[in-house]
């Protein structure tokens, strides 16, 4: 029913997960029905109590006209929902509860209703207000026993936005009887236009995911025009009783001002068609051949098996933890019963997006079991997991504005044919012969090791990065500060990198940082942190280090659009079968705006 003051994303009053709002000044008991309610629900409840004499329901109302009360509008919501239920007998699972009004209307003769919630406040209000025959269990959808199958209806009334879409779809498939219905009623995002993170599910994405996963859409009822006046009603009630609310609830006036502004923005988004209120009904069809699931840590051994089968070498638990163990990583799996047959991973990367800080996601470990690779249609595992990942994570209003990866041309064309990716760049390789081991008298080399975690070295590396960032204001580039260098290279669990600082002799002036790797292919410049004008000098030192270490060649890989900066140091250039993709599946920065703007090197791509 309202937006969070902090992030301007709508939060309905029927919430599945506990609201994160807190009111520091609420130290005394509040008048009923507001006591123990989290901010801003205490305000709504008390405003309705003052305005209408009661506040038994905090749901959206459906206003047929501007003359009716909130209570009448909320009754319209309940009546509409009840009209969509099948005749008795009927078993219903209600996920997320309010004060008991919805559960009570569901508890008709021969209706068997099970209600679950993970919100203690909801549970307490339910006990106080629900009819005697209604009951609720303190439990999450994720942990509900899937043996409790055979439900005719799984219902989310203004609660779906707090649960991952895949969890909703998968659990509904497990819990519904054949031809059972999934009903989702509440707020949705209708379009995303800004980089701000939105907490609402995008309506079209939920429909597409459900249809790909084994449901058919039987009704999509747009109720936005009827629901939007809820904000007008609340704004009027808060304005009318503003001083009373401040006094009774011990509010800071600024809290109320921010809440009012949040609701005005909410109302405007409804007017602009960015947010809406809908009732979706899906019918379960035949169980799909595969199902999608976010990979959990206790399933990582399945990933290890698929990784070894796909790439012919082993991913160690330490490497998995280094790559995917943080909260900023995501792994999506395609399952055939208990077998993991495909995987699509993503790791967050802080970037500069034309000079502005943003967060991207790097696609990693895209794998499909050899027995399933031939299925390259829109019903195949590659399409299913890629589309779901892009819908979940990449684009405007999503956790990551853009994504990037390093597919070969064949995989790139498959993704382009399905409308998933567009090409925004390609990688080239430049090779130089090593030089003799004689020193370069004007500059000196200082190794950086994991033990060099101190203020001076942090400052030096960050200054090098800042100089490089200044040269790349019109580019897309991953952040290369000390924290990144430390994690990516110095703390790698299995791979050794040579990290070298180049300084002038006789002064403290730093010229840049080189990161090298030695293997059977030669000495490779995997990363570079310096002003772009220093590239020839750093390549010179890399050639010397290659010669000192007995290598036959020095090479680096760089996005084609920046290859000219390395070509001034000579060398032989060739194009690689490595493409740089960007999402075209959902609303995101256009391919044309991103094309030939990435600065990417092997260190951005390689996780060995």
Image (spheres, helix red, strand yellow):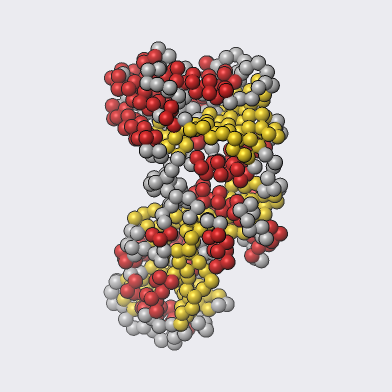
Displayed quadrant of residue 89: top right
Image x and y of residue 352, in percent: 37, 58
Residue 9 percent location from the top left of the image? 41, 37
Q: Position of residue 360 (x, y in %)?
A: 44, 55
Is 388 or 603 nearer to us in this picture? 388
Q: Nearer the viewer, residue 477 or 447?
A: 477
Q: Nearer the viewer, residue 356 or 84?
A: 84
Q: Is 229 left, or right, of 129 in this rendering?
A: left
Left or right, 98 with respect to 503, comes to: right
Q: Residue at x 32, y 81 (%)?
A: 442
Whether residue 266 is situated above or below residue 360 in the rendered picture: above
Q: Can you name the residue that lies furthest to the top here?
A: 53
Q: State the residue at coordinates (52%, 84%).
A: 552
Give the camera-side residue of 250 and 497: 250
Report the residue at 49% width, 78% height from top: 574
Q: How many labels sit on residues? A: 0
- Report the quarter where the C terminus lies: bottom right
Q: Could you tell whether 548 is left or right of 7 in the image?
A: right
- Rendering quarter of residue 54: top left
Q: Quadrant of residue 397?
A: top left
| Residue 155 rendering spot, x and y as whole percentages | 58, 29
Q: Residue at horizontal 57%, vertical 18%?
A: 104
Q: Eyeballing the image, is 458 above or below 395?
A: below
**Residue 549 visible to the viewer:** yes
Q: Please indicate, yes or no, whether residue 49 appears anywhere in the rendered image.
A: no
Which quarter of the figure is the N terminus placed in?
top left
Q: Is residue 2 above or below residue 389?
A: above
């Amino acid at each position: 029913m309202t937006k969070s003051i902090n992030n301007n994303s709508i939060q309905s009053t029927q919430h599945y997960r506990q609201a994160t709002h807190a009111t520091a000044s609420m130290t005394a008991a509040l008048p009923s029905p507001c006591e123990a309610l989290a901010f801003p629900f205490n305000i709504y409840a008390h405003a309705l109590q003052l305005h209408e004499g009661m506040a038994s329901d905090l749901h959206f109302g459906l206003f047929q006209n501007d003359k009716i009360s909130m209570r009448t509008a909320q009754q319209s919501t309940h009546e509409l929902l009840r009209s969509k239920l099948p005749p008795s007998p009927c078993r219903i699972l209600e996920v997320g509860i309010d004060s008991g009004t919805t559960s009570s209307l569901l508890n008709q003769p021969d209706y068997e209703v099970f209600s679950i919630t993970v919100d203690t406040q909801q549970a307490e209000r339910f006990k106080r207000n629900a009819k005697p025959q209604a009951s609720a269990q303190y439990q999450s959808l994720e942990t509900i026993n899937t043996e409790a199958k055979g439900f005719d209806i799984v219902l989310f009334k203004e609660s779906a936005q707090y649960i991952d879409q895949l969890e909703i779809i998968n659990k509904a498939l497990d819990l519904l009887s054949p031809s059972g219905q999934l009903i989702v009623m509440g707020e949705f995002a209708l379009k995303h236009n800004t980089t701000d993170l939105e907490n609402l599910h995008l309506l079209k994405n939920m429909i597409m995911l459900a249809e790909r996963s084994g449901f058919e859409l039987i009704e999509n009822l747009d109720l936005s025009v009827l629901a939007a006046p809820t904000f007008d009603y609340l704004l009027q009630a808060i304005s009318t009783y503003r001083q009373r609310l401040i006094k009774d609830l011990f509010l800071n006036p600024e809290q109320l001002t921010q809440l009012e502004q949040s609701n005005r923005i909410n109302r405007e988004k409804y007017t602009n068609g960015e947010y809406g209120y809908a009732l979706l009904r899906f019918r379960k069809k035949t169980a799909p051949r595969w199902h999608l699931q976010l990979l959990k840590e206790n399933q990582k051994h399945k990933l290890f098996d698929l990784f070894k089968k796909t790439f012919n070498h082993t991913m160690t638990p330490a490497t998995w933890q280094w790559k995917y163990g943080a909260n900023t990583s995501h792994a999506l799996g395609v399952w055939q019963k208990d077998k993991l047959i495909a995987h699509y991973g993503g790791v967050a990367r802080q970037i500069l997006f034309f000079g502005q800080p943003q967060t991207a996601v790097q696609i990693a470990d895209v794998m499909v079991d050899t027995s399933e690779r031939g299925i390259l249609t829109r019903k195949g595992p590659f399409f299913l997991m890629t589309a779901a990942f892009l819908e979940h994570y990449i684009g405007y209003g999503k956790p990551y504005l853009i994504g990037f990866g390093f597919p070969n041309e064949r995989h790139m064309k498959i993704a382009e044919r399905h409308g998933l990716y567009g090409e925004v760049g390609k990688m080239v390789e430049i090779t130089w012969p090593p030089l003799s081991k004689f020193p370069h008298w004007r500059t000196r080399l200082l190794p950086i090791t994991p033990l060099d975690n101190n203020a001076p070295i942090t400052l030096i590396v960050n200054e090098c990065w800042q100089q490089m960032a200044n040269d790349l204001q019109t580019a897309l580039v991953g952040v290369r500060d000390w924290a990144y260098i430390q994690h990516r290279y110095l703390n790698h669990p299995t791979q050794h990198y040579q990290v070298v600082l180049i300084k002038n002799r006789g002064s403290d002036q730093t010229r840049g940082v080189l990161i090298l790797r030695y293997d059977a292919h030669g000495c490779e410049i995997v990363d570079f942190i310096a002003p772009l004008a220093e590239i020839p000098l750093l390549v010179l030192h890399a050639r010397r280090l290659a010669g000192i270490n007995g290598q036959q060649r020095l090479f680096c890989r760089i996005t084609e659009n920046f290859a000219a900066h390395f070509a001034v140091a000579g060398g032989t250039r060739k194009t690689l079968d490595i493409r740089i993709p960007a999402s075209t599946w959902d609303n995101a920065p256009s391919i044309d705006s991103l094309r030939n703007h990435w600065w990417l090197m092997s260190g951005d791509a390689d996780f060995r």
